[in-house]
Amino acid sequence: MPDTAQPPTADGVPGRQHLTGYRLVGYNDAIAKLAASRESQGITYAEVANRMGRTYLQQVFNWLRGGAECRASRFFALADALGYDLALIPREDT
């Protein structure tokens, strides 16, 4: 039987395409990247809310426009809805 396992990619996850990451300097920077991603993907605020299982479109709008901060759990869900995984990566300088 042939080996059908896919080799790990640069991030170590078999079958996952390696994507460029962003080094973020704070919450506002992270939200700006997610907001830009939403726009570039052509996803509406309503679709982001739907992907998050949220019925409150106004909250998602406020988060992505910088009008309100969301809790960490909501931030992870927001990133996931836009196709991102969040990771803690050790700095090379420490």
Image (cartoon, helix red, strand yellow):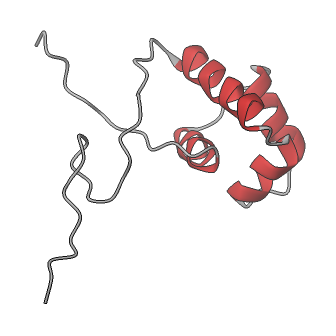
* Residue 86 can be seen in this image: yes
Q: Quadrant of residue 90?
A: top left
Left-right relation of 40 to 27: right
Which image quarter is the C terminus in?
top left
x, y percentage for residue 81?
A: 64, 49
Residue reaching furthest front?
2
* Residue 63 can be seen in this image: no
Left-right relation of 85 to 40: left
x, y percentage for residue 74?
A: 61, 45
Left-right relation of 28 to 36: left
Where 85 sits versus 13, above or below? above
Which image quarter is the N terminus in?
bottom left
Left-right relation of 74 to 2: right
Q: Residue at x 14, y 15 (%)?
A: 92
Q: Residue at x 80, y 38 (%)?
A: 42
Residue reaching furthest bottom?
1
Q: Residue at x 45, y 44 (%)?
A: 85
Where 22 sits versus 89, above or below? above
x, y percentage for residue 27?
A: 55, 20
